[in-house]
Structure formats: C-alpha cells, structure tokens
Amino acid sequence: MTQVAVAAALVVLAIVLSRAGGLGLERELATSAVRAAVQLAAVGAIVTLVFEHGGLAAGFVAVMLGTATFTSARRLSGIPDAPLRAGIAIATGAATGVVPMLVSGAFSTTPRELIPIAGILIGGAMVATSVTGRQLAERVRDDLAAIETRLALGVPVKVALAGTVRGAATTGLIPLLDQTKNVGLVTLPGTFVGLVLGGASPGEAARVQLTVLLALLAVEVVAALTVARLAVAGLTAAGERVLPPR
Amino acid sequence: MGVRFPSPACPERRSLGASHGAAREADFPAVGVPRIQTQDLTIARGGRVVLRGVELEARAGEVTAVVGPSGAGKSSLLRTLVRLDEPAGGRVLIEGRDAAEVDPCALRRRVGLVTQAPVMLEGDVRANLAYGLDAPEPAALDEAIAAAGLDRSFMGRTARELSGGEAARVALARALTRDPAALLLDEPTAALDREAAASVEALVRALAGRGLAVLLVTHDEAQADRVADARLEVGA
C-alpha cells in the first residue's frame, strides 16, 4: 500500500509541476492516473478469476485483441475500414509470436503463462500497427504530389509508394529496435522488473525477458508489414491510382 | 466491408530499348487517328461536375490549347486523360483505344503529363530523368534534356535545388525519356518571366514539330493564339 501511496504522491507532484510550467496537462494527468488505477484494479480481479477458471482465458485474450484493434483503428484515421485492417495486422503479428511459443512448449497454455505472453505480444503488435498505419496515412497525404508524379511517369502504384511504405514501417519499428539494443543498459523492461519483484532470480527474469524481446522483433515486423500492405490496399484503386486519406 | 488489393497489371520496370517500342506498338496499334480523343467526357471533382460533354482531339504534330478561366476544370481534364482520376462519364481514347482498357502504366508513358508546379524527385537531374526506367541509355537521357532546352551540365545538379523554370524543363525532359506520343502541359509558363515564357512557347512548337501531339492548358488567350493550331474552350 505504501508503494501505491508514494506513486500517487508523484502524480500529484506531476500535476503541480504541469500547472507551474504552464503545460495545461493537469486534467489529462489526473484522468490518466485514475483510469490506470481503475483498469489495473479491475484487471487484477478479473485475472485472478481467469487464473482460477481456465476456460475464461481464451475470452480474455479475445478482449485484449479487440481492445488493441479498437485502439489502433482510432490511430488509422483516413484509412477505409480501419478496424478490419488494424485487427488483421495485430492478430497476424501476435500469432507470429504466440503460436510458436505455445506449440514448442516454450510457454504452457495455462492462463498464468498464456495471458501475460499474449498480452505483451498483442501490445507490441498494436504499437507497430498504430505507428506504421498512422505514418503511412500521413505520408501519403503529405507526399501526394510526389507520389502522383511517380505514377504519371508510368510506374505501378506499388513502386510509387515503396519509399512511403519503407519510411512508415521503419518509424513504426524504431521504438522496439532501440529498446532491444539498449535493454539492460538504459532501461529494464517491465517483464524483467515484474519477475524480479515477484521473486524470480535475475537470471530467470533475464531469460524470459530475452525471449519476449526477441519474439517481439518478429511480431512487430509482421504487424508493421501487414498493416502497411493493408493500408496501401485501402488507399489505392484500380487503374494504378492513389486515393488520398479522407 | 472488404479489403482490396491493388491490381498487379503494370510491369514494375520498363526500359527505353527496342523491346519498349515493340511493347508500345502492341499496346497502341492504331495509326492515323488522333493521339488523344474524348467523347462526351464528363469530369467531376468532389462529387461536383466541373466539365460536361467535352469533345477533344489532339493530333500528331499539332498544339491544341485548352483555354479557360481558373477553376474551370482544365487541370482535372489532364489528370483524367492519364487516368489519375476516372471520368464521371464518356470516354477517353488514346490512339483509338479506350483508355479504360489500356494498361495505366503504358498509357502514362505514352501520354506524358507535366503539371503546373512540377515535383522534382529525390536525387540529381539524371536520377529524375531515369526514374522508373530499367538501365536507360545515357544518350537517350542526353537527347531528352537537350530537347527540353537544357545543357547536359544540368545532369548532376540536385533536382530539388533548381529554379521553377529549370524544374519545368527537367519535368518536360523527364516525360520525354518515356518516348511519349503526346504531351500534356499544364500552364507551363505561369511562373516564368516574359523572356523565359517566350522560350518555352518556342519549345512547345518545336516538340509538336517532332511529331508529338501537344495539349497546352493555358488561361492566356494570347498565348493560345501564338502557339496553338487548335483550341478547346472550357468553362466559358
């Protein structure tokens, strides 16, 4: 309880500093903190229930996937059928990591292992999907004249958009690449910290963290490429034409 | 609600060599017909009809001026002719063939579009001229830049650092590297001083003299009188 009290005091400090610094973020900081408290309390209760009733695990993973899809879709403004495209990208990316982990026996299918692993990988796929999709829509909107110049020179839309897709996907993957390169040197990621605080040995925590980080590389590359392809499909039309994001 | 994928119809590269010409003739077999023709063409922008019933013919060796006030739909007409936009009604014929049935990449090489504010792509002028071509012959690039009235020394210049007039000529040369049958020029002298504009007008006549069909969009009636063999009034 002391931990939560100290953390809450830090939020109050952040709100005071925001007001003193004229950032205007006081309301958003307070709302975010309250939301996080409510959501984590609810999740704690629900996960306890799910751990005791294995049949609920699949439903819980589906809820995580749905929430991630909804969150990403809001970022893909201007892309038609954004929820469908975001959902496919997140599910495909997450499955790239989850399925081999479970099939190989690296993690068991018990709720206690399935839910944290699925959550981390779905979260990674969501971030890659959101950033890549949003970047792609913005770049197509901003670079429309250059893209249409390329089309007018007689190249297919796939070629005209190649640099745009590459730039968007690269931007979507930069956070994970930086985190993976600097893990242990600059940051101690959540899995490692959680396991150590939960009583696992640092060696054991490092092994699990490494597994997650390496799996995330594949998960996020697949999610980024999938959403890029699906977004391009939504922003192009027959006759090698580009439809600017709405 | 469904996910669509773009048509894979266009080849990803096309060279300037002999095979290019052979493929082009197969795509556009007609001889002696207008290079560009429209039949009862209707153009809409943002759901609003801006041009209706356009009947246009652009013939080889001729300059056809499209004249009309700003906002009349002249630029939209050019975009529709190269299928960057689809017509709301009627037909576009490219050398006698319905444009809707022609591979769009082949069509856009056959009909070069130079916009009013041409976009220079990344890299130098040579890279711009060679964009989308598979190993173009240096002599072909030299010929194109000369035809646009620029010296070969421009080849190494960074394209995005060129002046407006220089960029317009590079855009023209870039279109010529595709060996087009027709050129669509959207207000090519709008940003130029009188001397530079006269030079571009002479260049337009020279390009028609080479056998190209040139469609010149202009709001300047006097320019149309000086340069064009035929004219189409829009939005009058």
Image (cartoon, coloured by chain):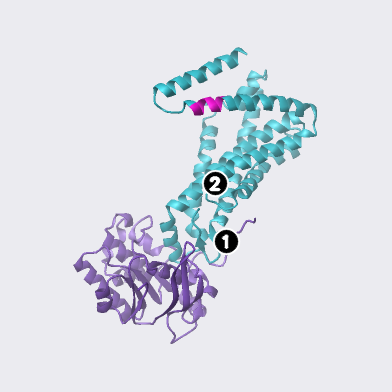
Instruction: Identify the residue under disc 2.
Output: A76
- Judging depth in this view, the residue of A104 and A147 nearest the camera is A147
Q: Amino acid at mark 2?
A: Leu
How many numbered discs, if any? Answer: 2
Indicate the quadrant containing the N terminus of chain B: top left, top right, bottom left or bottom right: bottom right
Question: Residue B23 at what x, y percent from top left?
Answer: 50, 76
Residue B179 visible to the viewer: yes
Category of crowding for the residue at label 1, using alpha-carbon neighbours closer than 10 angstroms: few (below 14), some (14–19), many (at least 20) = many
Figure check: A148 above or below A81: below
Tell me the residue at 30%/70% (across/down). B219
Prevailing secondary structure of the magenta residues: helix
Label 1 in the same subunit as label 2:
no
Q: Chain of mark 2?
A: A
Give me the C-alpha separation between circle 1 and circle 2. 19 Å
Q: Amino acid at mark 1?
A: Pro
Locate residue A110 relative to residue B5 in the image: left or right.
Answer: right
Residue B74: image location, x then y, percent: 38, 69
Q: Is residue B162 magenta?
A: no
The chain painted cyan is A
Chain of the residue under the numbered disc 1 shown in the image = B
Q: Which residue is mark 1?
A: B6
Towards the viewer: A137 or B106:
A137
Tint of chain B: purple
Instruction: Identify the magenta region.
Output: A27-33
At 54% from the left edge and 46% from the top edge, which residue is drawn?
A76
Q: How many residues crowd mark 2 within 10 Å: few (<14), some (14–19), many (20+)?
A: many
Q: Residue furthest left?
A: B195
What percent of the width, then of the height, locates residue A60?
72, 35
Look at the image and tell me in which quarter the C terminus of chain B lies.
bottom left
Label placed on residue A232? none
